[in-house]
Image: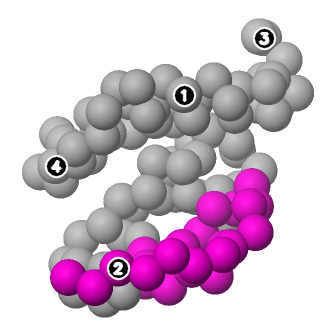
C-alpha cells in the first residue's frame, strides 16, 4: 500500500474535492454495487440517497433508513452510527427549509 498526503480544498460536495474524488473513483471502478447515503447530486453509485428532495438522488430518506432498505435488498453497508448521526445533524439545518413540518 502506498500512501501520500495531498491538499484538497474543503467543499460541501465532498467528492468534488479532487483527491477525494480520485480516491473514491478508483474503488468504484472495482465495485459491483455501491451506495452513497449522502449523495447530493452525484450519480457515481449504484444506489443513491439524500435527505434533500431537491437533489437528484434516487431516494430521499434518513440515512439509517436508507441503509436498512439496502440491507433488506441484500446490500450490506458497514457505517458506524456515529458517522451517520454526525452527518445527519450537520445537514439537518439545511433540510429544515424543505420540510415545513419540522
Residue 20 forms part of the magenta stretch: yes
Looking at the rendered structure, the secondary structure element under dot 4 is: loop
Looking at the rendered structure, the secondary structure element under dot 3 is: loop
Does residue 43 appear anywhere in the picture? no
Q: Is residue 26 above or below residue 100?
A: below
Q: Nearer the viewer, mark 2 or mark 4?
A: 2
Q: Is residue 4 left or right of residue 90?
A: left
Q: Is residue 77 above or below residue 91?
A: below
Separation of marks 1 and 4 at Cα, in angstroms: 21 Å
**Image x and y of residue 29, in percent:** 31, 89
Quadrant housing residue 2: bottom left
Separation of marks 2 and 4 at Cα, in angstroms: 27 Å
Q: Residue at x 88, y 27 (%)?
A: 97
In the image, 53 versus 64, the foreground residue is: 64
Q: Quadrant of the N terminus?
A: bottom left
Q: Nearer the viewer, mark 3 or mark 4?
A: 4
- Which residue has dot 4 on it? 76
Of callouts 3 and 4, the N-terminal one? 4
Q: Nearer the viewer, mark 3 or mark 1?
A: 1
- Which residue has dot 3 on it? 101
Of callouts 2 and 4, the N-terminal one? 2
Tell me the magenta residue range: 1-25
Residue 19 forms part of the magenta stretch: yes
Looking at the rendered structure, the secondary structure element under dot 1 is: helix
Cβ–Cβ below 8 Å for labels 2 and 4? Answer: no
Label 2: how many Cα within 10 Å (few below 14, some 14–19, many 20+): few
**Image x and y of residue 101, in percent:** 78, 11
**Image x and y of residue 98, in percent:** 82, 31
Label 1: how many Cα within 10 Å (few below 14, some 14–19, many 20+): few
**Image x and y of residue 84, in percent:** 45, 32
Amino acid at each position: 500500500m502506498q500512501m501520500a498526503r495531498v491538499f484538497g480544498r474543503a467543499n460541501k460536495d465532498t467528492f468534488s474535492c479532487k483527491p477525494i474524488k480520485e480516491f473514491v473513483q478508483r474503488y468504484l471502478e472495482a465495485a459491483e454495487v455501491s451506495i452513497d447515503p449522502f449523495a447530493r447530486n452525484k450519480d457515481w453509485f449504484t444506489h443513491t440517497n439524500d435527505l434533500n428532495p431537491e437533489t437528484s438522488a434516487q431516494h430521499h430518506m434518513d440515512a439509517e433508513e436508507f441503509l436498512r432498505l439496502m440491507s433488506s435488498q441484500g446490500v450490506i453497508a458497514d457505517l458506524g452510527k456515529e458517522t451517520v448521526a454526525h452527518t445527519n445533524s450537520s445537514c439537518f439545518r439545511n433540510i429544515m427549509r424543505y420540510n415545513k413540518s419540522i
